Image: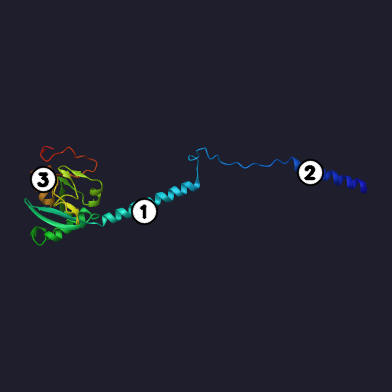
Amino acid sequence: IQALSFAFEEDGEQLEEEEEEEEIPVKKIRKNPEVDTSFLPDREREEQETRLREELRQEWAAKQSFLKEEDIDITFSYWDGSGHRRTVRMKKGNSIYQFLQRCLETLRKEFSELKTVTADQLMYVKEDLILPQHYTFYDFIVTKARGKSGPLFMFDAHDDIRMISDASVEKEDSHAGKVLLRSWYERNKHIFPASRWEPFDPTKSYDKYTVKDKKK
């Protein structure tokens, strides 16, 4: 019995040795550095790109916020059939409505018809376009918007709109905008110059329109 038991143990050890010899080592698969894998999903790369986009977005937003806080001088003409030029200081981020409120503060002392008027009852006409009150000066500046008779706002235009520190030369194609009562416009919109005015349309181009072209 002892001999048989000893033989079984030897056979078992031999089988284990044979199984160990038959095991094949698993090779690790590595990337070929010469193969372009940029098109493959890469979580680390995607996270890095996402962070970069967010940083650029924040940088752009901060720059725009800074620009909107810049002071600008706006020369306008209160129009009641003749022009009365005044200048107010605003910020680029201010809306046309806020601008008209400031105009009223300046004009009420001199023009009795404006004492009980609100900004909603006024219009701002620039380069023959009636500007919507919800737009800001910044909106027109960054898009380099044009009116019928020239650029809506230019920093290098004297008596128009410019940075306070800018010592610029007046350009022939720039004009002070008109601030007027809507009631005056309704009474005179069939007469020049009001007959030329039309609401601002951001999708429309006025590049080929000229000041002399009164038929359009």
State the image coordinates of residue 7 (x, y, percent, origin top left): 88, 45
Packing grade of label 1 (10 A; few <14, some 14-19, many >=20) is few
Q: Earlier in the sequence, mark 2 or mark 1?
A: 2
Packing grade of label 2 (10 A; few <14, some 14-19, many >=20) is few
State the image coordinates of residue 36 (x, y, percent, origin top left): 50, 38
Residue labelled with disc 3:
194
Is residue 183 visible in this depiction of the protein?
A: yes
**Residue depicted at x 16% and y 43%:** 150
Packing grade of label 3 (10 A; few <14, some 14-19, many >=20) is some
**Residue depicted at x 39% and y 52%:** 55
Residue labelled with disc 1:
58
Q: Earlier in the sequence, mark 3 or mark 2?
A: 2
Circles 3 and 2: CB atoms closer than 8 Å: no
State the image coordinates of residue 206 (x, y, percent, origin top left): 19, 40
For the residue labelled by badge 3, is the local secondary structure a helix, a strand or a loop? Answer: helix
Q: Which label sits in the foreground, 3 or 1?
A: 1
For the residue labelled by badge 1, is the local secondary structure a helix, a strand or a loop? Answer: helix
Which numbered tag is attached to residue 127? none
Residue labelled with disc 2:
17
**Quadrant into which the C terminus falls:** top left
Q: Is residue 18 above or below residue 103?
A: above
Is residue 134 visible in this depiction of the protein?
A: no
Q: CA distance from mark 3 to mark 2?
A: 105 Å
Q: Amino acid at mark 3?
A: Ala
**Residue depicted at x 10% and y 50%:** 184
Q: Which label sits in the foreground, 2 or 1?
A: 2
Q: Amino acid at mark 1?
A: Gln
Q: As drawn, is 71 to the left or to the right of 52?
A: left
Most extreme residue toward the front, as rendered? 34
Q: CA distance from mark 3 to mark 1?
A: 44 Å
